[in-house]
Amino acid sequence: MSDRYMGFYASRPFWAMSKPNFNILAEQGYGDVGRAFTDMMSEQVFVRETNDYSLKICRDGMVLLQIKHLAEETDVEFAAGRVAAMDTIVSRWARYLDCLNTIYLLLDSTVIRETNFGYFHLSEITHRDAFPISLPEGKFTGGSPPQSYSEKYWMGRFLSDYNIPNDGLLPFHYGKIQQLLVDMRMQTREQFQMPENLFVSLARDFEVIYYSPKGVEILAQLTKSLSEYKNGNFATSLILAWFVIELFLKDRWNRFIDSRQSRDDTGELRFYPSENDRPKRQKKIFTKYGIEAISNFLELMEIIPLEVFKKIDVLRGERNKNVHREQTPSTDPTICHSAFEVIQYFVKEDVNIEISLSTGYSTMVP
């Protein structure tokens, strides 16, 4: 099994399960204290394995993900002394970043739903926040720290990064432990110790999303939209949210068309996906309609509720105004709220999970 993972830290730190018992450090020999501290911080307290991925949560809040076929491909290349093509590397990073953003959104959603408290400051995870990491024999041994806020939490796994005076070979006494605990990285974690049931909910929801068609793509895009919203870029947030809404609309439309598909006596299809797919001699209807027509058809056939359609119609108009520069970029956050509500509806109905979103102004619970 590969030991390659991709990891990240949330924007606000937390203890997973419970705070470590740092008093144990006073019982260690001088040379063993540093390793014991790192082992405490990097302990894997929650693990969820499937045939396709491994999800791990460490005591200090580091979230680790391994997509098994990608990790194995990298192992094969490394063993053969080969370096993957740049487009392959970019593709792997893109897949990991989509998955990590999905996990972060679900983590935020789980905490809001289960505790009614928006603890995290959700933001998009980029290549500067995520980091590759190897765990030989399952142990954290270091590596290259990330280039963002995550660096201080990564370095916080090493006792040498704390402002504790070196008094020679004296044991790591209780006074030093108290000095350790006043570090801001420790103080901020005291605000939230995340219990196991929240990780169970997170893992359950991620498994549903991971195995849903385009599930990861949808929630990763939603994370980016929320991130732009929280930065005050409401027009960009709306455009990104609209991509998600279109995916759901097209999926419902395609499922409807598939349910009506048939062949005539000659074996020709009743519908064709596009003009290019239709045989030239045929004059049958093809199904390439614009999103305005699709949303109207879906409402007329009661495949989407009228109240949802009305929101979608307004959102489509606002999105078009922004994209085609028919107005100055929107400064109204409520239009984004409406887009998030529509996405929450589709995720609940089509993916069968509930997501709760923190907009920074309010907590949106379906």
Image (cartoon, helix red, strand yellow):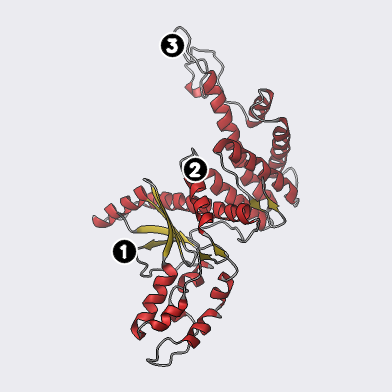
Q: Residue at x 68, y 43 (%)?
A: 341
Q: Which mark is residue 267?
A: 3
Quadrant location of residue 249? top right
SS for callout 1:
helix
Mark 1 burial class by Cα count in 10 Å: few <14, some 14-19, many 20+:
few
Query: Sequence-wise, which precedes: disc 1 or disc 2?
Result: 1
Q: Residue at x 58, y 51 (%)?
A: 223
Q: Residue 74: horizontal and vertical position, in percent? A: 32, 53
Q: Residue at x 49, y 52 (%)?
A: 200
Looking at this view, is 26 or 243 the one in front?
26
Query: Sequence-wise, which precedes: disc 2 or disc 3?
Result: 2
Q: CA distance from mark 2 to mark 3?
A: 37 Å
Q: Which residue is mark 1?
A: 136
Looking at this view, is 281 or 104 the one in front?
104
Q: Which residue is mark 2?
A: 208
Q: Residue 233: horizontal and vertical position, in percent? A: 68, 54
Image quarter (top left, top right, bottom left or bottom right) of the N terminus: bottom left
Q: Nearer the viewer, mark 3 or mark 1?
A: 1
Q: CA distance from mark 3 to mark 1?
A: 58 Å
Q: Is the Cβ of the residue at disc 1 closer than 8 Å to that at disc 2? A: no
335 up-or-down from 1: above or below: above
Left or right of 84 in this view: 343: right
Query: Sequence-wise, which precedes: disc 3 or disc 1?
Result: 1
The residue sitting at the left extreme is 80
Q: CA distance from mark 1 to mark 2?
A: 29 Å
Image quarter (top left, top right, bottom left or bottom right) of the C terminus: top right
